[in-house]
Each structure stands twice: as structure tokens, then as C-alpha cells.
Image: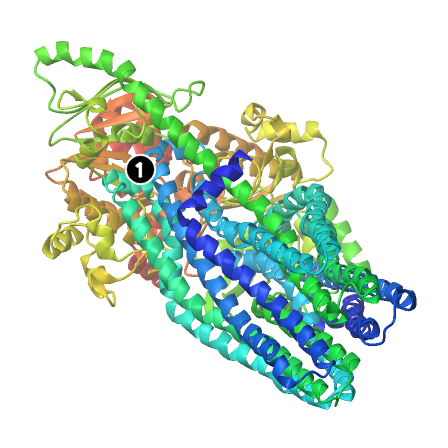
């Protein structure tokens, strides 16, 4: 993590922070010198105000300069921390975007969000406090010693010997407290979560008529929590005890030693007083380091998690290079590609012998899939979950690159087209579309950021979303998403369709929703999709028989292989995997009543081409 | 101010230990003052070369203070934390007691889980109230008094000078810092929330962003928000650093004032020069007590904000209770009158709902709008309908979570409003979609339903819910911890435990409230199979979004927007080709998951045959 500090601006700010801190330390020593001179002058030298005022003014200046140094030093440290956080957040997010949704999606999302938000934030204290303090805890005591030894070697030795004991004891006791916490961790975390648990389960408790008893339970658990925590804290407080003890006892030792030698005239007062004033300055940085110890620990933990993400190699780029080694990728070539894609309507897409496996080849998802999406055709992809349907969609969206085989669009190898450029020609309606924090209009504009409000409204109209959007408190300007209004799954879906309509791309990938089967809106959604698909090449990941049966062509995937393809009627007639699928989905109705089954089958029959 | 008083009142029961903690805090600072002051006196006195015997008292004092400070610090920490935890314990109990009558009605209008975790977080925030907001000013006041008295014994002017600087540093600096950062603070909170939202959006919406070519724009948004946040943060931190360094300066300034005032006194022989060093160090070291004050004010603000939110909840609870106390005569009287004529005819044996109308708020839409249904003992009734039709509301009304509906709900002819909620709920066993499993052992979670149940009864219930084999396979069986911090259960396992729990309760009416919702198709199927067996011979009210499997029900009520759209048995409804049939059609033709999985062998065989 320290390499972050090497970045020029950060390094400069950190160096300034330490330099100013050290300067403040030097001023403190100087201040002690002047103070002891003034006091000794007034006390023993018989000097009056007239002789001492100039020195008092100097002293006042020193005090203000020292305060200024401390303030500026801390400001520099904060700035350094801000630099590091900015740069890390930028690099993390850029890297995650490069890794793509295949890496960042799914179960990893929670951890990644944590790293980006809390993880980066916890570096603030590490860089602005712990790191400078670590340097100062070494530099300032050494400087003080440099003045203490010439003044009085004995006092110097006392300081020198006690100083290393402080970190040693702190670490020892810290370890002890930590192991104690670890041992109690399960109990502690269970107890600390208990209150929330009971509150969340309040309805359940009420149903079982047990909610009143819980008052005692809350009290008992709270008491237990107190006892356990205090047992841990008793040890943790010991480190404070030792810290104080070492600092104060050695100050006392220094003072008594000085006093005794003064009595016998082996030392003059001014020097003795100077040393007494130095003792607290000597221990202060060590004490501050102790209070920052925790910041250091949590910063190191956060850094470990941050670098684990940053050091994840980009998987997509390597295989892409391998499959399309012949593919040109110079900018001029990209312009050429752009020209070929630009006027494209309803392209032809060819998958030839495409292979893909996750986890470095351990989990094959597609093994040698070959098919063609003809221009303007609606092709349905069916298969069980895990059959490879989403992988096909992700390959087509260039979230993944084929590990073997190739994808061609209008005869153009897809690997040669930069992903960002390619995605301009693809619209995607995902199963669970994400609504981003922003207005409804912004969310639809994701399809085309420069679209006017009229165009947005027209797209919403076509997607069957206009009505409910207008009923929202602020219409198209209603904030939705993370900090805004929560829309239902069906509403989000229609917004996603509006996005795709607004984008108006020649190739459409549609991941049919399995949930939100709401008869009232289903029709609207179906009609909206119907309008959307017109005149485009469409790949539908179908979850329902009706959808599949309406497609021009059906691809049946099983365990990463294409086992069947054809028209609905032909496939049913052939009696293969698809027919069994249709059979299975109908047979569920049969044992119930012939009427119901007939109704269900009749409907499918009616809509099939 | 009222909130502050209320908050302080919460500390009252622990005032003795809190005062003790503050006293130890005072002693900690005082012993440091003592250490440095006596050390200075010792050196100054020694410089006058008196007989060593004269130095014995200061030497003993120096040693005492040198050791005592650490011990005092330890005691202060211990007592203050102990007292704080006691207060928190009391707080939790109080808030639980206040919230208990509210659930779930009073808690729903806020954002569900959000509110709850906020309450818990707010209670935790109050931990700092005594430790960091109340104790430091107490300690500072004590130290200031002691030091002023001490200095005053030598010269009143010295005492006043130190009091002035102490006051400026202890009150002026914190207040100024607070004012300087207040406006920024609000902006900071807002910007942080926006950045967080943007980051969460970036991760969870990465696929959408990239598919629409918006990744770069999102990066720019995050970058600019991030920069804005860092700017604001640096500004607030700079204010904090400034107030910190000013507080440090104050201690030195006090020492300087003492010197400036005392040197003329020494020159005029009004003050013995031997005390000069001592007085100066006593003044400066007393400022240790000022150091935590700027932060104390921030903690005070945070505590007050947290307390305000908590009090709002408690007050709402209190208000709800008084209104509930007033309500019964108003709504009970027509009801008390109503049952009498019906009692002439033999009362319906079972659950009877008539003309039920209900809305959550006085102005909101009717969630239930004239619902009729009857469920005789031993019967099986299903209530189905699209989401938002009012199914779950119906259950909430049956459980008396809300009482202000029109129409009637009767159990064996008795209006449920006249049955005490606990007694009513004793007659119902509910398996809800979101049944909460507590962070406790499986045994404890099951025994919730019936604390006196024997091991055999528990195993029987588990067997009926078909979870017994799984429980036995766990390392600690029924004593395995589940829930958030414990063993991670799958959705199906959780629901099975919920079923077992409901069975253990053995109430006459079994309510299945979307018991299989949110599960994947295969698990849903398996759970339903288990439920079918459980339902045999029981009175069942099943609220369901899925229609498959409802053939066994005696009657199905189809709700649409709070009204009964259709009623009948499964086949009747299908034949009618209405809403039920429409829903059936949508559900029936699902392709991917459930039909495929039962046939892996067949499809593998198929592909082999084709090859």
C-alpha cells in the first residue's frame, strides 16, 4: 500500500506533513529552552520583567508558529489521503469495468461495493493520521534525545530505555486483547446483532404470541453483552494503563533524579527544568501513535482487499487476442469497421464452434456452439438454467470473449470490433433491469443520452410505461433507484424496454422475465416487445412456451451444447428435447383436469405460427 | 433543549456510576497536573539546595502521581464503559417495549428494515453520549475549578487569566468549529450518499451500463462526485485540525499568561520565585481536559440527532397506544350490537369474512374493497390474485395487526375484534413468506411456537415438514445456530423450518401466506409436496401467487384489486376462462426451470440419440 504514497503529489503532501510535524517538534524543543531560560532568569537570576519581556514575545511567536505548523501538517496529511482515495477509487472502478459484469456481478457484488465504499474510506485515517504519526513517533523522540543527552545523559538514558517499552507493551497487550476478542467474537457478534434480530422478527414473535416475553430476553442479552464486552475491554484498557504508567513513571523518575542532583549542585536549574519540559514532548508522539494503532490495522486490512481486486488479471483480453490474432485493431481499421456497421439494419450473426468455460476452464458453459441468426429473424434460446443461455447473451454483448471459435456479424469477425463500438449496435433488455439513481427520464435516456424529452416520452409510450410514469409524483423527473422511489419489477421492465426502443439498435437481445407474471400488465409488455422486435434481428432468452412458440426459430441448449434447432411446429413434431419440454410443461395440467389442460394447450396452439 | 433533557434523564438511573466515572476522569487529569507541578516545585526547591529531608514530601508526591495517573485512567475507562453499557441496556429494553405494540402496523409506513436497523444504529450512537459528550465537560469543569482554586491561593490574577483562556478554548473553539463546519456537514452527508448510490449502481448495474455504452460516463460521474466529496471532507477536516491545534495552543498560552503575570510579581517579591515553574506547568497541563471538548460537541450533535429519531418512534408508539385505548368504545359499540341479531341464527362454525373494506391510510386507495369469504372448520380455502390484490393484507387483518376496517371478520360467530390479540393468534399458525428465523439454535427457533414442547413433538413436526433428515445431518442437530450469524440455510430449508414451527404450534387454523414464494421452481415444488401432506385433515387458509397444486383446495377465491373477482373450485375456475384462467395460462407455459430439471436423463438421452 505504501506504493500509493510514492505517487508524486501524494508523496509530496505526505513528506510535507511529516516535515511540518517534525518542525512543530523542533519548535516545541526550542520553546522548552526559552521557557526554562525565562523561568530560571526570573527565579534565580533576579531578572525582572524589563529584561524578560523580549524573550516572552519570542516565546509567544514560537507558540503561534508551532500551532500553525501542526495545523498545516495535518492539512497536508488530509490532502494526501484525499489524493490516495481519489486515485484508488478511480482505478478500482476502471479496473472493475474492464473486468466486466461477468466478474463483478452476482455474489461478488456485495464485497465489491463494500471495498469501493467503506474499504476506500477507511484509508483516510491510515494515510492522514497513522502514516505521518508513524514517522513522527520515530523522528520526534530521536530529536528530543539529541537535545536531552547533551543536557543530562542520565535523563537521556531513562527516556531512551522506556521509549521502546511503550510500543512493545502496546503490541503485546493489543495481541492479547485481540485473541480474547477473537475467542469471544462469536458471542459478541451474536449478542450485538440480537437487538436488530428481535426487532426484525417482531411480527413473527407477535404471531406466536411471544413478543412480550422478549422484553426480558432483550434485557438479559444486553446484560450478557455488557459483561462479555467489559471482560474484553478490561484487557484492552490495560494497554492504556501501561502506556500511561511508562510515560508518567519515567517523567517522575527524571524529575526525582534531577531534583536530587540539583540539591548537591551537580546540575543547574535551567538545564533541569529544560529536561522536565522535554519529557512530555518525548512521550507525546508515542502516545498519539497508540491512539492511531487501530486506524493502522483497519487500513491494512482494507488495503489487502483493495489490492486483491486491483490485481485480478483481466481475463477477456487474452483469449480475444488469441482467437482473432489476424484481426486488425489499428484506429484507421476501427473507422473502417464503424463505416461497415453504421448503416447496418438487422444484421446476420453467426456463432461458429464457440467455446467458453468459466473459472479458468474448470466450468464449461458452452462447448462448440454453432448457429446463425438471420437478418430480421426472431430466435428463441431455450434450455434449463445452466444450459448456457446467459453465456450466449454475454458473448454477444462482449462481456465475455469466446475462448475458441468465433462470432461473425455480417461476415465481420466480432473480435475485431472494439467492444464499446459494437455495443452501440446492440440493445439489451435484461431480466432484472437496473434502475440507476436519477430521474425516470435519465434512466430511459441510458439508451441515448442526447434524446429529447419528447423522444423519451415517445419511447415510454411505445413501451407501455408512459401512463404509470405520468402518475408518479414528479412524472418523468421523479428520482428513482438507490436513493429515489422504488419501482416494481414490472415497471422497471417496461423502462428497460423504453431504453431499448430509444436506442433503436439493429440487434436486440431480450432476456425474458420469469417473475412479475401479472396478467394485467403482461399484455402491455408483450405488445411493447412486439413493437420493439419489428425489423430487428432478435435473440430472445425464452422462459415461457408462448414466447418460444412465437419465435421464427428455436435453439435448444442443453449443458452447453446446441441439441436441437428449428421451428416450433417442426420441433414438436420431431419429438426430441424440445417436444419433451413442451410435453412436460403441459403435462402438469393434465392430472388436474382435462379441461384445464385443453385450455392451456389450446392457447399455445392458437398463437403458434 | 427538550431532547437534551430527555436524553439526560435516560442517564439518571446510572448517575452514581457516571459521577464516579467523571470523578476518576478528573483524578486522571489532576494527577498529571500534580505530577508536573510537583516535579517543577521539586526541581525549583532543590535548586535552592535545602537539606534533602525537605525534599522528601515532593519526592513522594511525584512518585505517587506518577503511578496514580495510570490507575485512575484505568478506573475511569472501566466505570464509564460499565455505566454506558447499563444505560444502553435500559434503552434497548425501553425501545423494544415501545415498539412491540406498534408492529407491524406502525413500523410499515417507514421503510421496513431500514427503520429497524436505524433504530439499532441510533441506540449504538448513544453510546458516545455519556462517554464522549457528557463526561468530558464534567471533567473539564472540575479540572478548571481545581486549577483556579490552586492558582488563586497564590494570586487571583493568575486564576482569572487561566479561567479566561480555558473558557475561550473550551467553549469558544468548539462552538466556532461547529458553526464553521455545519453548512459543509450537511452537504457532505448528501454528497456521500450520492457517491455511494453511484458506486452501488456501477457495480450492480455494470452489465446495463456497459451494454448501453455508458461505462465511461459513469466513471466520470463517480470521479466528479468523488472529487466533490474529497473537497468537502478536506474542508471539514481542516476545520477539525485547526480547532485541535488551537486547543493545543491554548494550553501554552495559559502558561505564557501565567509567566507574564507572575514574573513582575516575583520581581516585586509578592510571589516566591520557587513557585513560578510549578504554577506555569499546573496551568498548561490542566488543558489536557480541554482537548476532548471540540469533539464532545460533535458527539453531542450526533447523539441529539439519534435521540430525536428514537424519541419520535417512541412518541408515535405512545400516541398509537392512547388512540387505541380510545378507539374500542367507538368501534366496539356497533360491533357489540351487531353480533346479537346474528346470534339468533346459529353462528357459522369457522372463519367468516363479510363486506371487508380496508385501506392503510385515511386517504389511500382501498386495498380490500368488499371481500366475502367463508372457511368452515376442516375446509381448505385458497386466496389467489396478482400481486397487489390485497392477499397479504387479508392475513394481516385476520391476525389483528390492523383493526380499523369496515365489515366483519368472525371466528365461530365471534367478531375477532372482541378477541384479545394474543388469544386470537393462539388459534392460528402462520407460515409466512418472510418468516423470520432468529439468530439462535434450531431448537430455540422451533420452541418459539410452543415453549413446552418435548423433543419428540419437535421431531414429529420436523418430520412432517420434511426437514428432520437435514437437521440430523447438521453437526449439532437441533442445537445448530441458524440465522444471520449462524448456519446459512437455503430458502427452502428456512421455509421448512417455518412450517415445522407452525405445526408445532398446532393451532386449529393453519395460514399459509405465500409460503412458497421466492423459492426456485424445484424447491417450490418440493415444499408444496410437503405442504400437501401437512394440510391433510387441517383447516387451511392458503394465500398464494401460484396456482399449480391448488386442485386440492375446496374453494379458491380470486382477488383483483381488493375485490373478489371469481370464486369456485379449480376446474370450475379454469372452465370459466376469466382472470384465474389467464393467470393459469401465464404460469403454465413457463419453459425453463421446473419442467427441464426433472428430466435430465431424458434430455441427455435425447442428445445422445441425435448424436
**Label 1 residue SS:** loop
Residue B219 image offset from top left, x and y in percent = 69, 52
Q: Is residue A336 left or right of residue B386?
A: right
Q: Is residue A604 left or right of residue B282?
A: left
Q: Is residue A116 above or below residue A320?
A: above
Q: Is residue A75 above or below residue B532?
A: below
Q: Is residue A464 above or below residue A204?
A: above
**Letter of the chain that mark 1 sits on in the rendering:** B
Residue A391 image offset from top left, x and y in percent = 51, 57
Residue at 50% from the left image edge and 51% from the top image edge:
B130
Which is more toward the observer, A251 or A135?
A: A251
Which is more toward the observer, A492 or B314?
A: B314
Image quarter (top left, top right, bottom left or bottom right) of the C terminus of chain B:
bottom left
Residue placed under numbered mark 1 in the picture: B546
Residue at 73% from the left image edge and 74% from the top image edge:
A277
> Picture quarter containing residue A468?
top right
Q: Is residue B424 left or right of residue B252?
A: left
> Picture quarter containing residue B365?
top left
Neighbourhood count class around disc 1 (C-alpha, 10 Å): few under 14, some 14–19, many 20 upward = some
Residue at 48% from the left image edge and 48% from the top image edge:
B121
Amino acid at each position: 500500500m505504501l506504493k500509493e504514497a510514492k505517487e508524486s503529489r501524494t508523496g509530496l503532501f505526505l513528506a510535507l506533513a511529516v516535515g511540518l510535524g517534525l518542525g512543530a517538534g523542533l519548535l516545541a524543543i526550542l520553546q522548552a529552552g526559552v521557557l526554562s531560560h525565562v523561568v530560571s532568569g526570573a527565579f534565580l537570576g533576579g531578572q525582572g520583567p524589563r529584561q524578560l519581556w523580549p524573550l516572552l514575545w519570542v516565546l509567544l511567536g514560537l507558540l503561534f508558529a508551532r500551532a500553525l505548523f501542526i495545523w498545516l501538517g495535518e492539512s497536508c496529511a488530509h490532502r494526501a489521503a484525499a489524493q490516495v482515495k481519489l486515485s484508488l477509487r478511480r482505478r478500482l472502478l476502471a479496473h472493475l469495468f474492464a473486468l466486466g459484469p461477468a466478474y463483478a456481478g452476482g455474489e461478488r457484488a456485495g464485497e465489491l461495493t463494500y471495498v469501493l465504499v467503506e474499504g476506500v474510506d477507511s484509508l483516510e485515517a491510515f494515510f492522514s493520521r497513522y502514516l505521518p504519526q508513524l514517522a513522527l513517533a520515530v523522528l520526534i523522540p530521536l530529536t528530543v534525545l539529541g537535545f536531552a543527552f547533551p543536557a543530562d545523559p542520565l535523563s537521556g538514558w531513562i527516556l531512551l530505555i522506556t521509549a521502546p517499552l511503550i510500543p512493545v507493551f502496546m503490541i503485546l497487550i493489543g495481541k492479547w486483547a485481540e485473541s480474547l476478542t477473537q475467542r469471544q467474537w462469536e458471542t459478541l457478534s451474536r449478542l450485538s446483532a440480537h437487538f436488530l434480530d428481535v426487532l426484525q422478527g417482531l411480527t413473527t414473535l407477535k404471531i406466536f404470541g411471544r413478543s412480550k416475553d422478549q422484553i426480558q430476553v432483550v434485557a438479559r442479552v444486553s446484560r450478557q453483552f455488557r459483561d462479555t464486552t467489559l471482560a474484553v475491554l478490561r484487557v484492552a484498557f490495560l494497554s492504556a494503563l501501561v502506556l500511561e504508567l511508562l510515560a508518567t513513571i519515567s517523567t517522575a523518575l527524571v524529575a526525582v533524579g534531577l531534583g536530587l542532583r540539583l540539591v548537591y549542585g551537580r546540575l543547574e536549574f535551567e538545564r533541569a527544568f529544560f529536561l522536565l519540559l522535554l519529557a512530555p514532548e518525548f512521550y507525546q508522539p508515542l502516545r498519539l501513535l497508540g491512539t492511531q494503532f487501530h486506524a493502522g490495522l483497519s487500513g491494512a486490512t482494507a488495503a489487502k482487499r483493495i489490492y486483491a481486486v486491483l490485481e485480478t488479471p483481466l481475463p477477456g483480453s487474452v483469449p480475444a487476442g488469441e482467437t482473432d490474432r489476424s484481426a486488425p485493431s489499428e484506429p484507421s481499421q476501427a473507422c473502417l469497421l464503424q463505416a461497415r456497421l453504421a448503416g447496418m439494419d438487422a444484421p446476420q450473426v453467426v456463432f461458429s464452434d464457440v467455446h467458453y468455460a468459466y473459472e479458468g476452464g474448470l466450468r464449461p458453459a458452452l462447448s462448440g456452439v454453432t448457429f446463425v441468426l438471420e437478418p430480421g429473424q426472431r430466435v428463441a434460446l431455450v434450455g434449463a438454467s445452466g444450459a448456457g443461455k446467459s453465456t450466449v447473451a454475454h458473448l454477444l454483448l462482449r462481456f465475455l470473449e469466446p475462448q475458441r471459435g468465433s462470432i461473425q456479424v455480417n461476415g465481420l469477425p466480432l473480435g475485431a470490433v472494439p467492444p464499446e463500438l459494437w455495443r452501440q449496435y446492440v440493445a439489451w433488455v435484461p431480466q432484472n433491469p437496473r434502475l440507476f439513481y436519477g430521474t425516470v427520464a435519465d434512466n430511459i435516456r441510458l439508451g441515448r443520452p442526447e434524446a429529447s424529452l419528447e423522444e423519451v416520452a415517445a419511447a415510454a409510450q411505445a413501451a407501455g410505461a408512459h401512463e404509470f410514469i405520468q402518475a408518479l409524483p414528479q412524472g418523468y423527473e421523479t428520482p428513482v433507484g438507490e436513493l429515489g422511489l422504488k419501482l416494481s419489477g414490472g415497471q422497471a421492465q417496461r423502462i428497460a424496454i423504453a431504453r431499448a426502443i430509444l436506442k433503436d439498435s439493429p440487434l436486440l437481445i431480450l432476456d425474458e422475465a420469469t417473475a412479475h407474471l401479472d396478467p394485467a400488465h403482461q399484455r402491455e409488455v408483450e405488445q411493447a416487445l412486439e413493437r420493439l422486435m419489428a425489423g430487428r434481428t432478435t435473440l430472445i432468452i425464452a422462459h415461457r412456451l408462448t414466447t418460444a412458440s412465437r419465435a421464427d426459430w428455436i435453439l435448444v441448449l442443453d449443458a452447453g451444447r446446441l441439441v436441437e434447432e428449428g421451428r416450433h411446429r417442426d420441433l414438436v413434431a420431431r419429438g426430441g428435447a424440445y417436444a419433451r419440454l413442451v410435453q412436460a410443461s403441459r403435462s402438469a395440467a393434465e392430472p388436474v383436469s382435462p379441461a384445464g389442460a385443453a385450455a392451456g394447450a389450446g392457447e399455445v396452439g392458437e398463437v403458434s405460427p | 433543549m427538550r431532547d437534551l433533557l430527555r436524553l439526560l434523564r435516560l442517564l439518571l438511573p446510572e448517575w452514581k456510576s457516571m459521577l464516579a466515572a467523571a470523578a476518576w476522569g478528573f483524578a486522571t487529569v489532576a494527577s498529571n497536573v500534580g505530577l508536573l507541578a510537583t516535579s517543577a516545585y521539586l526541581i525549583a526547591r532543590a535548586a535552592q539546595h535545602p537539606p534533602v529531608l525537605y525534599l522528601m514530601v515532593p519526592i513522594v508526591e511525584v512518585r505517587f502521581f506518577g503511578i496514580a495517573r495510570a490507575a485512575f485512567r484505568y478506573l475511569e475507562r472501566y466505570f464509564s464503559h460499565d455505566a454506558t453499557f447499563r444505560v444502553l441496556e435500559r434503552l434497548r429494553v425501553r425501545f423494544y417495549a415501545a415498539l412491540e405494540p406498534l408492529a407491524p402496523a406502525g413500523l410499515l409506513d417507514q421503510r421496513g428494515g431500514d427503520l429497524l436497523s436505524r433504530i439499532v444504529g441510533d441506540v449504538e450512537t448513544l453510546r458516545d453520549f455519556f462517554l464522549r459528550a457528557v463526561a468530558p465537560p464534567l471533567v473539564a469543569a472540575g479540572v478548571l475549578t481545581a486549577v483556579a482554586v490552586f492558582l488563586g491561593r497564590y494570586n487571583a490574577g493568575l486564576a482569572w487569566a487561566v479561567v479566561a483562556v480555558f473558557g475561550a478554548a473550551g467553549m469558544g473553539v468548539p462552538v466556532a468549529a461547529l458553526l464553521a463546519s455545519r453548512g459543509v456537514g450537511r452537504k457532505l452527508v448528501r454528497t456521500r450518499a450520492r457517491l455511494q448510490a453511484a458506486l452501488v449502481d456501477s457495480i450492480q448495474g455494470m452489465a446495463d451500463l456497459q451494454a448501453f455504452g455508458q461505462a465511461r460516463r459513469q466513471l466520470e460521474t463517480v470521479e466528479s462526485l468523488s472529487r466533490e466529496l474529497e473537497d468537502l471532507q478536506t474542508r471539514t477536516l481542516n476545520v477539525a485540525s485547526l480547532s485541535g491545534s488551537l486547543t493545543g495552543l491554548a494550553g501554552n498560552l495559559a502558561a505564557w499568561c501565567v509567566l507574564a503575570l507572575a514574573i513582575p510579581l516575583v520581581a516585586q517579591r509578592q510571589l516566591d520565585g520557587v513557585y513560578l515553574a510549578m504554577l506555569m506547568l499546573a496551568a498548561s497541563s490542566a488543558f489536557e481536559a480541554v482537548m476532548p471538548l471540540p469533539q464532545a460537541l460533535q458527539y453531542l450533535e450526533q447523539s441529539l440527532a439519534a435521540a430525536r429519531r428514537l424519541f419520535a418512534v417512541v412518541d408515535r408508539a405512545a400516541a398509537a397506544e392512547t388512540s387505541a385505548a380510545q378507539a374500542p368504545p367507538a368501534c366496539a359499540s356497533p360491533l357489540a350490537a351487531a353480533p346479537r341479531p346474528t346470534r339468533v341464527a346459529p353462528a357459522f362454525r369457522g372463519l367468516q369474512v363479510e363486506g371487508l373494506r380496508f385501506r392503510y391510510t385515511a386517504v389511500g386507495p382501498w386495498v380490500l374493497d368488499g371481500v366475502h369469504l367463508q372457511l368452515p372448520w376442516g375446509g381448505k380455502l385458497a386466496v389467489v390474485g396478482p400481486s397487489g390484490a390485497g392477499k397479504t393484507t387479508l392475513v394481516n387483518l385476520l391476525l389483528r395487526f390492523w383493526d380499523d376496517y369496515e365489515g366483519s371478520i368472525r371466528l365461530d360467530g365471534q367478531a375477532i375484534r372482541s378477541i384479545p390479540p394474543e388469544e386470537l393468534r393462539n388459534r392460528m399458525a402462520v407460515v409466512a413468506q418472510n418468516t423470520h428465523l432468529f439468530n439462535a439454535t434450531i431448537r430455540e427457533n422451533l420452541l418459539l411456537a410452543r415453549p413446552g414442547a418435548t423433543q419428540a413433538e419437535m421431531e414429529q413436526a420436523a418430520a412432517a415438514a420434511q426437514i428432520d433428515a437435514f437437521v440430523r445431518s447438521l453437526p449439532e442437530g437441533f442445537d445448530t445456530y441458524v440465522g444471520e450469524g449462524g448456519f446459512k440455510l437455503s430458502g427452502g430449508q428456512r421455509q421448512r423450518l417455518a412450517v415445522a414451527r407452525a405445526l408445532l404450534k398446532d393451532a386449529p387454523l393453519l395460514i399459509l401466506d405465500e409460503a412458497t414464494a421466492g423459492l426456485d421452481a424445484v424447491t417450490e415444488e418440493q415444499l408444496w409436496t410437503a405442504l400437501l401432506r401437512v394440510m391433510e385433515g387441517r383447516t387451511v387458509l392458503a394465500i398464494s401467487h401460484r396456482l399449480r397444486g391448488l386442485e386440492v383446495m375446496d374453494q379458491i377465491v380470486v382477488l383483483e384489486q381488493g375485490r373478489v373477482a371469481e370464486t369456485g373450485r379449480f376446474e370450475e375456475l379454469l372452465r370459466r376462462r376469466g382472470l384465474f384462467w389467464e393467470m393459469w395460462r401465464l404460469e403454465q407455459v413457463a419453459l425453463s426451470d421446473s419442467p427441464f430439471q426433472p428430466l435430465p436423463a431424458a434430455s441427455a438421452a435425447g442428445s445422445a440419440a441425435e448424436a
